[in-house]
Structure formats: C-alpha cells, structure tokens
Image: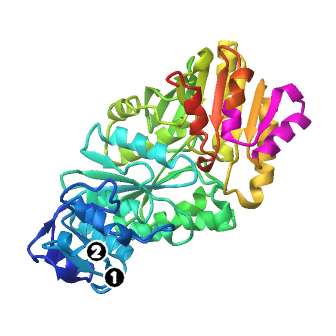
Amino acid sequence: MELSLKELTKVIKGKIISGNPKSIIKSISIDSRTLNKGDFFIPLLGEKCDGHQFINEALSKRAIGFLTSMDENRLNFKREIYLNKIIILVENTQEALEEMAKYVRKISRYEVVAITGSIGKTVTKEIITSVLKQKFKVECSPENYNTEIGVPLTILSYNDDIQILILELAMRGLNQITRLAKICKPKIGVMTLINNTHIELLGSVENIVKAKSELIKAIPKDGVTILCRDDKWYTLFSSISNSEVVNYGLSNDSQVSAKDITLDEMAKPRFKLCFKDREVDISLPITGDQYVLNSLAAAAVGISYEMDLNQIKKGLESVKPFKMRMQIEEGKRNILLINDSYNANPTSMKAAIKVLSYLKQKRKRRSVAILGDMLELGKFSGISHINIGKFIVRQNVDLLLTRGENAKIISQTALSNGMSKDQVHQFSSNDEIKENILNLIKPKDIVLVKASRAMAFDDIADFLTVHN
C-alpha cells in the first residue's frame, strides 16, 4: 500500500489538519502496542476503550501521523510530539478504515477468494492457500482477521505484487458479509457446511443461511461460487448464484469428490480425489477425516484456477498441522494429547470424539475427554449438549471431565446413559481441572481437550504438554 496524503484524504473524505499533501503513507496500525516506526495510526472506538487515548503513545513510537474523529480543540495530545506529523480529521475512523481498504482493493490487480460458512472456515482458508501456492503468488489473512476491522487491515497489508488474496469472512449478524464483500470484492466465493453455530446471534438457522448467502450474491457473473453438494441448503444456494457454480462433497453426484477414504495409525486421512474422469491419491498430513471435505473445497478452488490434480495433490499434502485444531502432541505422563481447544460446535465436537475413539481402538489405550461448553447455540444448546453426552457413551470414552454450565449437561447425560460415577468428573474452573487431572489420567492415555474459544481450554492443553 502506498497512498499520498492528498489521495488518502480524498478517498476517506477527510480534512488535513497537519502534514504535507505530498507525504506518502505506506503502512498503518490500529494498535499502539505493536506499532512500528513510520506507521500511520488509526484510533478505533472499541467496546472497552477509545483508540484516541493512545495517540500520544503512537506518536512517541514515531508514527508518521494519525487519523482522528475529534477536532483539534478536543484532542488531548502533546504538542511537542505532533509537530510535522500527518493529522487527518474524519467523521468516523472505522468508516475511514473501510473506505481506505475499498480504494486500495479497487486499484489492486490481484483476485480475492473469500470463504464463509459455519464449520471449518479458517482450516479451509489455510488449505486453499497451500493448494494455490503451488501455482500462484498467494497470501491469506492472519488468523481471526475476518471482521470489519481484520479484512480491511489485511487488504492494506499487501502490495500489488501478489496474484491472489484469500480471506475469511466472519458473520455475527445480517448484512455483515455484504459489508465485507463490498470491501474485498471477491472473484471466488467458498461456502463451507452450514449448521446452527451462532444461532444465538441470528435467532434461526434460516437467518444463518440468509446471512451466509450474502457472499454468494456478491460473486460477479465472471466469478465462481464453490458450494458443498452435501449441504442441505445446496439447492437454495445454487439457485441464487449469478456466477458459475462448482460443487464439492462426498456424495456421488459431486463434481469434486473423494472415495476410498481411510485413516492411518494417527487418524490422518487417505483418499482418492476425483474430478470428472481423473483421480489422484491424497495423503493428508492432518488428523481427522472431517478435513477431507475442507480439502475438497480447496481442490475445487484449484480446479477453478485451472490447476491440474497433481499440483492440487502437492498443495494438499503440504498442509501444516493447525494450532489448537486436532493438534497431536506428546503430553505429560506419556499421554497422547489431542489439542482441539480452539473452538467447538456440535459437528466439530463429534468429529473430535470420533478421532479419540479411533485412536483408542488402534492403540489399545484408554480414552479421556476433557470437554467444555459449546457456546452461541441459543435454544439448541440443551439438546446439543445432551446429544454429545449420548455420543460419548456410544464411543466408549473411558473418562469424562467437564467444566461449564452447559458441559454439565454432557456429564449428566453420560451418567444417565451408562457411565459410572468414577468415570465422570465435573469441575468449576480450568485451574481445578489442572489441579486434579494428573491424578485422574494414566500413563499412555489418549486425551482430548475441546471447548468453545471463550472457555480458554488451550490453558488446560498447554498444562498437559511436555514442555510444562
């Protein structure tokens, strides 16, 4: 990114308070703690604080200037450190950030692949990146840079020397994806499976579908929409697309599909990737057969960019394991730790428990599940946790530890469906789990740690790793 002060001011409809109109802005920051010398500081209004409070700190770290929605009389900055700095007055700094990103995207030559859905968005983004890197110069958004703040920051972080930028688009309400799509202008849209994740925010699955479909409507006629053929909403999604549709899935009528799916000793998938009359053997280096579907989505993107199956194979087999997502680690007391603590919903919870059960059978060891609440499920929360409790019993988990009001339902259901009291333990805090866990697990146990992000179960997983 390189914008002159004059050019930037015009784009964001701002007023120059200080600075040479010919000055060049090359990088921005919204966080004074991580700001680098020469960055242009954009103070945003957050839930807990106003970024304007940190203007002095940003300038002391040699920011070249800042954006502000406060006029000069209201600003509380030190005169001696703002001399010769760029200062631009705008009505709203968040809107200015978005307008800046829209302009940079408009003048950029690269294409954008945007991903949304309920399950596996970040994983799919990473796998798509690995695939497309086999043929193109590609970048993708950092983890969690998927909001009205993160998407603009990602766009403003890259120069026009890349060919494809891959973005994840988050959704916490209607019209948010439309807002993000107007900023990033995607050429290809990828939809992962839809379920009731975030239903607490949207009220119904139908509203979730409506919100997610905003991405499909944003794809231009000369673009491509990538849809999951196995999704119950596939027919609806394909009917509202204005672009070519390429579908993927495990069903026989999928354009991009997989067959002969097996798991190796560490539950890593092996399968044949199929497209038209061609197929190629794939060995994924990540744990869990749930990642086959994510890989098919990535393959569909590669095919849309006219990559051959061998290039796609190389990309799929080059994927790096994901931090806190089915991450297999050596643990204390020689346990095998499955760290899946990044997040949880009913689908991903069952997938993780299936892997736990598979490894138990393969290795002839005990299985231990440390589970926390699955959040944002609204009216489906109770039944979802009951179903996980029943699933735990069906999968013959040997020891169950839970923490959280919702996860307590998992424990109670497991007890009422056949697990004994010495197999089920409920805790009130992560610290209490850490105080007791080493007395409950046995050497060589296989231990799964999983909960929604807000439960901070990565703290428990970290405690169980060997380095601690």
Q: Is residue 332 visible?
A: yes
Please, what is the three-letter code of the amino acid marked with disc 2? Phe
Residue 194 marker: none
Residue 77 marker: 2
Q: Secondary structure at mark 1?
A: loop
Residue nearest the viewer, comparing 431 with 100:
431
Q: Residue at x 59, y 59 (%)?
A: 235
Residue nearest the viewer, comparing 246 with 355:
355
Foreground tag (2 vs 1): 2
Q: CA distance from mark 2 to mark 1?
A: 11 Å
Please tell me whether residue 383 is drawn above or below residue 74 in the rendered image: above
Q: Residue at x 18, y 61 (%)?
A: 26
Q: Is 432 colored magenta in this rendering?
A: yes
Residue at image mark 1: 70
Q: Quadrant of residue 430?
A: top right
Residue nearest the viewer, comparing 314 with 336:
336
Give the magenta range: 407-434
